[in-house]
Image (tube, rainbow, N blue to C red):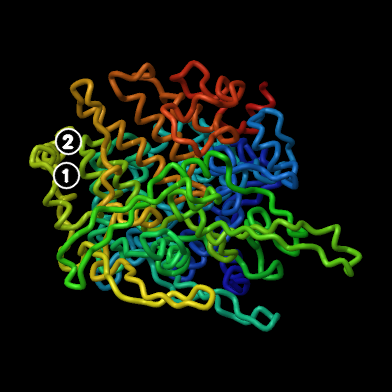
Amino acid sequence: MKLKTIMTFALAAILTVGVTSCEDILKVDSKSVLYDYENTLDQATDTVYSVLGIIKKLQKIADRTVILGEIRGDLVAISDHASDDLRDLYSYDFSKLKSTNKYDQPVDYYAVINNCNFFLTHADTAYVRNNKNVFLKEYITVLSYRAWAYLQLAQIYGEVLYFDKPISGDGASEGVPMNIKELAQTLLLDFKEEYMDYDTPNYGKLGGEDTGEGGKSEQHESVDLFIPVRIIMGDLCLWAEDYAHAAIYYHDFLSNNAKSLTTGTNCSTWLTYDFANIGYDSYTSLFGKSGAITYIPMEADQYSGIVSDLRNVFNSTSDNYYYYQLTRSQAATAISARQNYCYHAMYSDEMRDVWPAYMADKTAEENALLKGDLRLYSILETDYDYPDEDDANSSLYGTEIQTLNKINSEKIWLYRKDVVYLRLAEALNRCGLPQTAFAILKDGLCKQTIDSISQGEKDRAKSINGVDISVVYDFPTAYFTQARVTWYWTSITTGYSTTRVYVSEFGSGNTFGIHSRGCGDAGYDPTYRIPVDSTRVNTLEDSIRAVEEALIDEMALETCFEGYRFGDLMRFSMHRAADAQSPAHGGFAENEFLAKRVATRETATIDDREDYYQVKDEALYTKLLGDGRSLNKNWFLVLPDKKQAE
């Protein structure tokens, strides 16, 4: 990234947290956290460098946010060569983590928060020039960073200390213990509706300099480093269980950015309906610029600062002797294989006559990653590198080569398009609009699919707990158009023969269902629908829960290895505790939702059966279930002061 020079000035300009240990930052009378309270951030250079200084702090927590979000979920497994730090986290025996575990360092999250609090306390938000508030963009940006950091901290530690003022050396700052729902409700109070009218700051391009090794570092558009305020407010509302406003914020973000934030048609598909060859794979390009909303920029080399180690965790590299440390779990493979791949064929060149949809024959494939959804196959490549007999050191190197195509060492994603769409679907579903939520997965939100949603559901949207969210049906039709299959003739050469075949790609539109990223023409799949129990009367609550099952699986398929998984499982468990029919009704969470999934991370099979979670790690299941409804301390790492108390 080569922001060393910029960041050096930034750190000189901002009064950063001086921390010597985790214990220091968590004690309100710390003598090492000192500020000059006479200083006010009232110059443009002050605020710019301060914001860049906060980004520098974010670099330190980037990798661990991904690791801690995945290793406690159900989609990741450790390899035989995983570090002790990773192995200890995977064991779920968090109270015994060593103090040296590099992923268990809450001080670094509080360093971000404390720098944000200093900025928010001292920025001159009353300064106006040319009838415009000069520093409010930076103020809103820092509010968003602080909210994001607090949400991550609470997902990792469960109950954390909330500070709204910088920690000082005089003991005046006192933290209030809060769980994540309480935090979200509190943080929302800092955001005002007028903030919606402000764009993120724009400092131009950063990086793109010579690495000194014959190449150049990534060049970053500075606007991609900031969290859009509507997204973070949507997240806060989701955790606070204010689903109506969450849906509005996510919708407004997407619809106000229609030209660039339609879903697009990037996907991985079979070439023809005989399922003989993977013929079209543009899916991994989503993890470049085309899918970006916000990321943490990392340095290109250690000389410049903090570099990401995710490549050495998930990939086989020369630095780790080709021994990757984390890989897909049995559960991740099973969720992928359980999906149906649908190929929708049209008979004539005029594309008027339609053949029935073809479903992939799962028994025809030996490779489990080709039995259903193709996204896992697309992003996680495996190969074998056989040792060179003439190389005396060949025995030191691993032979199974793994490459995770989601990894970009200079970009750690916070948000991308599909994440926002999936959270919009989550909010809509919990608003009591399951058809609308499911449309995001199956067809994509555009005029054609919105027209097919029942009038009863649309009427219900006009009053969700007294809030009219019918705006969610308003997407700019000039930009959001349903993707249709484009057909053409091509030639396939096999051996010595060439065959002309009729193949398809998505085209002539820019929006389709997220499920089509890896499952073919999901809009035409007759098996992909909201299930109905024909033996009884189905209620709205039944549909909400059924769509939630589809959503949590779609999140696994679409966002695996990106750091969201534990938070998604935790949040859905909390949603379910609000259901009247839930045994956890009125509690913090319906713990079983999370417990049964994580407990089958090593035991899940690709076989279709009535109960996917029957065979599981019973000891882990019992630990994660707890009493079934309380905030279960076994889900979370332990803050240093609580470890000492235990």
Q: Quick one: SS at disc 2?
A: loop
Q: Residues within 10 Å of mark 1 (few under 14, many from 20)?
A: many
Q: Nearer the viewer, residue 612 or 117?
A: 612
Q: Where's residue 353, x and y in %?
A: 16, 62
Relative to 427, residue 322 above or below: below
Q: On the image, numbered disc 1 is attached to which residue?
A: 469
Q: Residue at x 35, y 27 (%)?
A: 576
Q: Where's residue 378, x and y in %?
A: 50, 59
Residue 167 seen by the camera: no
Tag of residue 464: 2
Q: Nearer the viewer, residue 181 or 609?
A: 609
Q: Is residue 602 left or right of residue 143?
A: right
Q: Nearer the viewer, residue 6 or 69?
A: 69
Q: Residue at x 23, y 57 (%)?
A: 355
Relative to 544, residue 21 above or below: below
Q: Residues within 10 Å of mark 2 (few under 14, many from 20)?
A: some
Q: CA distance from mark 1 to mark 2?
A: 7 Å
Relative to 485, residue 597 above or below: above
Tag of residue 524: none
Q: Are marks 1 and 2 in contact (CB under 8 Å)?
A: yes
Q: Quadrant of the N terminus?
A: bottom right
Q: Residue at x 70, y 60 (%)?
A: 384
